[in-house]
Amino acid sequence: MKVIFLDFNGVLDTYDNMDVINKDNLERLKTIVSSTDGKIVISSSLKNRFYYTGTHSRLMIYLLNTLKNNGIDVIDITPLADTRENEIRMYLETHPDIDSFCILDDDYYMESFKDNLIKLVYQNDKGNGLTDQDVLKAINILNGYQKKKS
């Protein structure tokens, strides 16, 4: 199985329109999914409310519904831990069926997953989310069967 660990803010939205899924960024994510048969695991901090209250926030429900309505399978959320890197590590340890994975994130440097991390960068001092270059990197990681590292 191929997994895309997905952050939301800075990946699917833009600096100019935060908390709203940008149509171009959604299309780029769809390209990654369709080119790799990747499955989404939400690693965004939006999932944290679920662990504290048992319910998702409005923004998380919006994210899940938008992805579902666009044919993108969200199969899970990462567990809650002290860092996102540890959350992903824990997820990988409990899911040995994952053959390859990539991480789409704008906030974190994950040294142990540097070969799998697509660290989105700000362009012109504004976060624009996924770029065409990020899409190519993700597809290469997932289809190249980059082995998970711990």
Image (cartoon, rainbow, N blue to C red):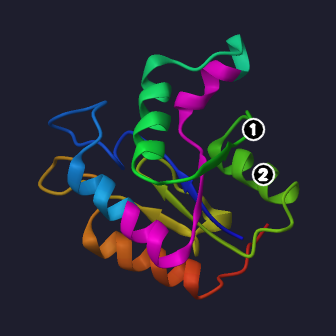
State the residue at coordinates (74%, 76%).
99
Distance CA(mark 1)–CA(mark 2): 7 Å
**Which amino acid, mark 1?**
Pro
Mark closest to the chain's N terminus, 1 or 2: 1
Image quarter (top left, top right, bottom left or bottom right) of the N terminus: bottom right
Q: Is residue 114 left or right of residue 7?
A: right
- Residue 20 relative to residue 143: left or right: left
Residue 7, how many percent across, how many down? 48, 46
In screen coordinates, is 30 left or right of 60? Answer: left
Q: Amino acid type of disc 2?
A: Tyr
Q: Is residue 20 above or below residue 90?
A: above
State the extent of the magenta-drawn residues as a range.
Answer: 30-50
Q: Quadrant of the C terminus?
A: bottom right
Q: Residue 69's quadrant in the figure?
A: top left
Mark 1–mark 2 CB contact (< 8 Å) = yes
Q: Which mark is residue 91?
A: 2
Which residue is drawn at the image coordinates 34% and 47% (left, top)? 12
Q: Which residue is mark 1?
A: 79
Badge 1 density bin: few <14, some 14–19, many ≥20, Cα 10 Å: some
Q: Is residue 36 within the magenta segment?
A: yes
Identify whether 70 is placed above or below 148. above
